[in-house]
Image (cartoon, helix red, strand yellow):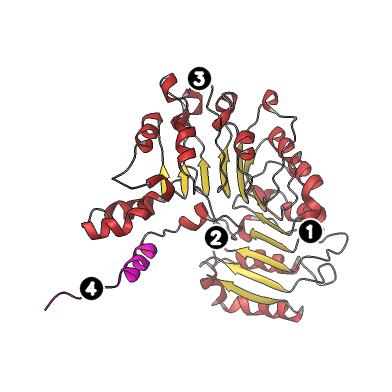
Amino acid sequence: MPAPTLPVELWLCIFRWATLSSSTLSLCATDYVPFQATTWDGVDREAAAVKRTLVRVCKLWRELTRDLLYEDVTIRDAPSVQRALRPGAAGEDKHRKVRRACLPYQSCTPYSADDISAVADFLHCCSQLEVLCRPINMRAEAMTFDYPAADCPALQSLQRLDWWHINEAARSGGVNTLTEVVRAAPHLRYLSLGGDLWLNLMERRPLVLPTLTTLRIRRMNLLFLQQVSRWSMPALRTIIIDIFSTPHLLEPLWETYGKQLRTIELGRDLKFYVMDLVSHVVARAPAVEELGYYFLFTAVPQVPQEPHLALTTLRWHAHLNQFFPVEDNAFWQHLAEHVAAFPRPFFPALRKVALHGREWLKVVNDPRFIPLVKKLGQRGIVIEKNW
């Protein structure tokens, strides 16, 4: 009796689920998804390891999973770029299968003049590229950019760009310059930025991002923020702030985009506990409808001086830290203070508190959570569970 076989469609579904990791969504989403942490190097190691294993099992599995193997690639240095440019098996256009590419700056430091155009040629071949990542490099000072970089090709399919700015690389221009890459990607929807910009690299030329809806601020100096605040982003509705040094550093953002924002998310950094950025944000974004933050990493906001008429949803993530163990009374006092910080007279449109993170499972099963739910219910606010 022959061994039972599964339909190809079912195998493809199994392989798809098997190659999704806890980092896949945060690295590949082209629209805003709440509380998606990023990796500094931009590499989905867990998924990549599974894909490399699957293609080695047998010829059938290799044929079925080859597209998955090529959909997310990391090019680590200039020779790797040259190898990636080589054609695949007979009749195979492997570059069209690439949906996400991670290009560390080492891949753009050519060993010779012959390597200058390699990265640009690679990007040109990837005609279906949707996500491009230029991650941070902890040894950026050791890299040299002796040759001008090649011009960035048109990236018509690109929807997300994760960019860490390195000044020495930006001086070489082309594919190493943020503004050049952004101009080559007219359909960009998601942009995350980090780094410190030198004064002599600020640009006066206007930059328009007509389709950008989500901007993520990872860590930027004042000059970089001022540069971004001069851009035109008419469709921008969401800003995520991972780290900040002082609320005044963000003033250029609020002055330019505050009135058009609908969603704001604050990151998982204790600086948000030292300084009350929530009140600062609420006062400068009058149309914001959703506000999300890690409540154990965030200071209790002050009650605003004037009512905020647009806020309908609070999103609280319960990622734990050592300062507030769930068993301690300090945890419950901190949570109760956040509940009390949004009284109905000042937030008349508030209708929902969305709870994110599996850490809430221990919280919602504690009897001390019941009185807080009742207080929210008395204000007409419902609890939504997301874990």
* Alpha carbons under labels 3 and 2: distance apart: 45 Å
Task: Tell me which label, 4 or 3, sits earlier in the chain.
Answer: 4
Q: Which residue is mark 3?
A: 147
Of residues 300 and 312, the one nearer the viewer is 312
* Residue type, mark 1 in image: Gln
Q: Residues within 10 Å of mark 1 (few under 14, many from 20)?
A: some
What label sits on residue 302 in the rendered view? 1
Residue 36 in the image: above or below residue 132:
below
Coordinates of residue 323 in the picture (x, y in percent): 57, 56
Look at discs 1 and 3 and give the one toward the viewer.
3
**Residue at the (60%, 57%) spot, across then down:** 31
Left or right of residue 378: residue 53: left
Task: Tell me which label, 1 or 4, sits earlier in the chain.
Answer: 4
| SS category of the residue bearing label 4 | loop
Q: Residues within 10 Å of mark 3 (few under 14, many from 20)?
A: some
* Alpha carbons under labels 1 and 2: distance apart: 22 Å
Q: Residues within 10 Å of mark 4 (few under 14, many from 20)?
A: few
* Residue type, mark 3 in image: Tyr
* Residue type, mark 2 in image: His
**Residue at the (73%, 55%) spot, across then down:** 278
Q: Which residues fall within the magenta stretch?
A: 1-17
Res. 54 in view = no
Mark 2 in CB contact with mark 4 (< 8 angstroms): no
What label sits on residue 319 in the rendered view? 2
* Alpha carbons under labels 1 and 3: distance apart: 53 Å
Task: Tell me which label, 3 or 2, sits earlier in the chain.
Answer: 3
What label sits on residue 14 in the rendered view? none
Mark 1 in CB contact with mark 2 (< 8 angstroms): no
* Alpha carbons under labels 2 and 4: distance apart: 43 Å
**Residue at the (65%, 65%) spot, across then down:** 315
Q: Which residue is mark 4?
A: 5
Residue 79 in the image: above or below residue 12:
above
